[in-house]
Amino acid sequence: MHSASVLAQTDADKTNDLAKASQNPVSKLISVPFENNFNGEFGPNNSTQNVLSIKPVIPIQISENWNLINRAIVPVVSQPGIPGGPNRQNGIGDITYQGFISPAKPGAVIWGVGPQIQMPTHTDEVLGNENWAAGPSVVVLSMPGQWVLGGLLSQIWDFAGSGNDGSDEDISALTFQPFVNYNFAGGWYLSSAPVITANWEADKSSDEWTVPVGGGVGRVFRIGKQPVNMKMAYYYNVEKPEFGSQWDLQLSVIFLFPK
């Protein structure tokens, strides 16, 4: 009985450690997140936009002291059509790559820094921008006790592409994602990770910012031997562009591959 109890406690500790690692953007954990966002009251007709973001994360140890955390963000979009066009536009948006150089043996403060590159991969002209864009990204966090606290900040500018002839809008965009997670026993956790954005090229100053507030709940568990992180969250946009969505219901399924 004592041995079984110790084994159960060890498994529980592993699950809790895995939950915290999955909340660290620059951990050594390989993961494949599928994040689906139902964006409500979107566009001039207050319809629903759906964005499935596929975000594989592959860390590579490039030296004894440094890791390179590679992340791609592939948006699969279904949104209301424009007047005179089809009822909905469906396709892939512009793919983003993030690469963070991070210490292989971090201290109390964990950090990573590197480039972010946005590529004009959209399959429909209304789902992206013809320009390439790039800029710096930085993430800083700490994991005291049951908490995972931090933020990710990036800024990109367009630098090349067919849109630079004036056929598409210039790009200058800031993204800030603060995140607060509190972990409970059994892999359960509370989370708030709003994605705050600023479009510096917006035609009107009132259309620059998108500021969501909210949060959700998640759990790390196993399906057979496969660790999975599932999360549900709701965000309300207290500041948004004129035709931006009013709210976002976010459902995530993240497949984890610990080494």
Image (tube, grey):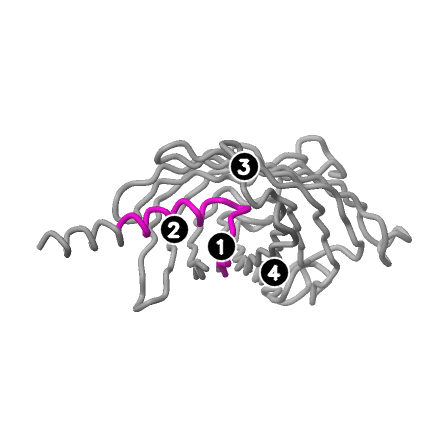
Circle on res. 29: 1
The front one of 109 and 72 is 109
Q: CA distance from mark 3 to mark 2?
A: 17 Å
Mark with earlier residue (3, 2): 2
Q: Please check the rendered image and state whether residue 19 is part of the magenta-colored stretch, yes or no.
A: yes
Which tag is nearer the camera, tag 1 or tag 4?
A: 1
Q: Where does residue 197 sit, x and y in percent of width and height? A: 62, 38
- Nearer to us: label 2 or label 4: 2
- Amino acid type at circle 4 is Val
SS class of the residue under badge 1? loop
**x, y (%) of residue 149?**
46, 34
What's the distance in space between the residues labelled 1 and 3, CA to CA?
15 Å
Name the element at disc 3: strand
Residue 18 marker: 2
The residue carrying mark 4 is 74
Sequence-wise, which precedes: disc 4 or disc 3? Answer: 4
Q: Tell me the quarter of the picture where residue 80 sits.
A: bottom right
What is the number of callouts on the image? 4
User: With 126 as the anchor, is 164 left or right in this view?
Assistant: right
Spatial separation of the CA atoms under disc 1 and disc 4:
19 Å
Q: Quadrant of residue 97?
A: bottom right
Three-letter code for the amino acid on which mark 3 is drawn: Ile
